Image (cartoon, helix red, strand yellow):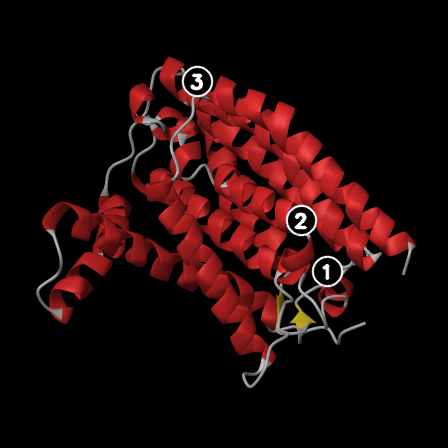
Amino acid sequence: MPDAAPLWATVILPVALVSVAVVTAGFDAVLSAAAVRGRPGSPREVGTWAAAPLREAFRLLAQQPRRTIAADVALGRIGVVLVPVAAVLAGAVLPLGFRPVSDPAVGIVWFNAMEALAWAAVWLTGWGPNSALSLIGGYRFLAQGLAYELPHMFAITTAALGAGSLRVGEVVAAQDGLWFAVWMPVAFLVYLLSAMAMSFWGPFGHPLGRDTAGGAAMELSGVDRLVLLGGRWLLMVVTAAVSVPLFLGGGNGPLLPPWAWTLLKTALVLAALVAGRRLLPTLRMERYTEFAWLVLVPATLLQALVVAVVVLNR
């Protein structure tokens, strides 16, 4: 069992996740600006584009809150706050190199449970303002969860099956010779899809869709909106980071120290997720649900069966 990280790591973890989320949002802003305005003419222009998310955050901090008639302010605010809280709690099992902040015996179950908490959080956010379009956004996330959660659960269970443990640290140790992504490609790809769905990102952005004027975030303004949108970035960072110990060997790698390999692999997965927003088509939710239940669930079950046979014959 790997050594646990020192106690101060519990304080550093949220700061580190927020920092990575800000950098990722800046990277996405640069890509968006380049798509509209063409290639940047100077590094200063790149920096201006990259700082756009920070400028928006400061604008929201100064914005006056907006209230709807008969809104359940407390319920909606609980939902908003729970989104980043669920992301940070899910990240508690992340190892930086080989030293996790916390490595419980059921670490993979803990991560999955915090995802379920995010379901409730987004639904409460949509319910609280007493607005039809906001409520539609909240229910869309629940419907999206019904589509992606089963294949996602089978994907992370397959990684646990390959390691013979639900402890994240032991899953990393089991990949010392060969990454799980190499011989569990279906589970890895399904995990990446569900990572985007969990953070309602790109083709899975229906809960905040433009056709519903922003969906669950429609009636949010000021700090509430900032916390919800920041929580979405945190969810994406955490799900990307968890793919590293589950499928990409954690801190295993030549030359560089384990923590550097962890950061490098997380950055590459995040870049893939950011690019996925621009490369993958957006499907109507009922079509993705059909695809998930008829294709992804059988595919992940078959992948789990192959892994079980390999494990039994070791």
- Residue depicted at x 64% and y 62%: 245
**Of the pair 169 and 253, the residue shown nearer to us:** 253
Label of residue 136 in the image = 3
Residue bearing the label numbered 1:
168
Mark whose residue sits in front, 1 or 2 = 1
Estimate the x, y position of residue 272 in percent, counting from the top left.
43, 53
- Residue 98 is tagged as none
In space, the residues marked 1 and 2 are separated at their CA atoms by 10 Å
Q: Are marks 3 and 1 in contact (CB under 8 Å)?
A: no
Residue 275 visible in the displayed image: yes
Q: Earlier in the sequence, mark 3 or mark 1?
A: 3
* Quadrant placement of the C terminus: bottom right
Report helix, strand or loop for mark 1.
Answer: helix
Q: Which residue is mark 2?
A: 111
Residue type pointed to by label 2 = Phe
Residue 167 x, y percent position in the rendering: 78, 59
From the viewer's side, name the closer residue of 289 and 225. Answer: 289
Which type of secondary structure does the marked residue at label 2 adopt? helix
Tell me: residue 144, above or below residue 22. Answer: above
Give whichever of 205, 92 is nearer the camera. 205
> Mark 3 or mark 2, which has the lower sequence index?
2
Residue 101 horizontal/vertical position (percent):
66, 67
Q: Is residue 171 left or right of residue 230?
A: right
Q: Residue at x 55, y 40 (%)?
A: 194
Query: Picture quarter containing residue 146?
Result: top right
Q: Amino acid at mark 1?
A: Val
From the image, state whether disc 3 or disc 1 is nearer to you.
Answer: 1
